Image (tube, rainbow, N blue to C red):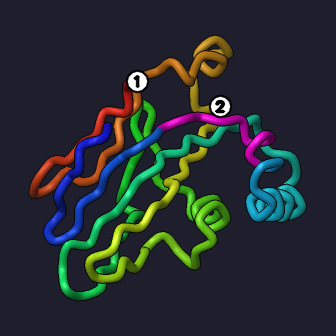
Amino acid sequence: MGAAIPAGSVSITVTDFKIVDAKILMKQVPQYANTMKEVIANNGEISPQKVALVKTTIRNESAEAKIVHLEMVQLESRSWGNGIEPFTFESINNSNGVAVKVPPGKTETYQLSYQLFDFQFYSKQAWDSVEKRPFDLVLSTYPVMNIVSLQD
C-alpha cells in the first residue's frame, strides 16, 4: 500500500483500506442508503453485509484523457474474492459507472467498493473477524501481474 503501480501512462496508488458495516455506510452516504433501500424494496431483506473500501488515487501522466476500467480490479482474501460493486461505487464516488475518465496530467481519488456477505464465509467466527483477514487488491494478472497487499 502506498506505492504507485504503473499501468501504461496511468498509475494507481492505494492510500487506505477499511471494512465497514453496510448499515454504518448507509448512515454516512445518503446515495448509498437510497441504493440499498431500492435493492431491499425489490428483493426483500438481504443477508448481513459489510463493504470493503479501498481508497485509490489514479494519476494520468499523459497529454490526453484516459479511461480507466476499474470493473476489472478484484479484491481477494485467501479463497474469497469479489469484483467491484458498481452501484455502491457510483453512490460513494458520485459517478456514472466504474470506467472513469481521468484528465491529462491530473490525479483523481476514488473509493473502490466491494461487498462482503456473511454467507460467503464458512463460519460465524470467520465472518465476525473478517476485518483481520489479509486482503489483496488485484489490478491485473496478465500480461503483468499487479497485486497490492492491503496489510499495514
The one of 22 and 152 positioned closer to us in this rendering:
152
Residue 48 rendering spot, x and y as whole percentages:
76, 35
Range drawn in magenta: 17-25
Q: Callout 1: few (<14), some (14-19), or many (20+) C-alpha neighbours within 10 Å?
A: few
Residue 33 is left or right of residue 72, and the answer is right
Total number of numbered discs in the rendering: 2
Among the 4 quarters of the image, the one containing residue 34: bottom right
Looking at numbered disc 1 in the image, what kind of residue is underneath it? Pro
What residue do we see at 10% from left, 57% from top? 143
Q: Let me know if residue 149 is in the magenta part.
A: no
Name the residue carrying label 1. Answer: 134
Q: Report the Cα–Cα distance between label 1 and label 2.
A: 19 Å
Name the residue carrying label 2. Answer: 119
Identify the element where label 1 is drawn: loop
Residue 78 shows up from this direction:
no
Residue 16 shows up from this direction:
yes
Residue 46 rendering spot, x and y as whole percentages:
79, 45
Residue 24 rendering spot, x and y as whole percentages:
78, 40
Looking at numbered disc 2 in the image, what kind of residue is underneath it? Phe
What residue do we see at 46% from left, 40% from top? 16
Q: Quadrant of the C terminus?
A: top left
The one of 114 and 16 positioned closer to us in this rendering:
16
Residue 85 is left or right of residue 133, and the answer is right
Q: Quadrant of the N terminus?
A: top left
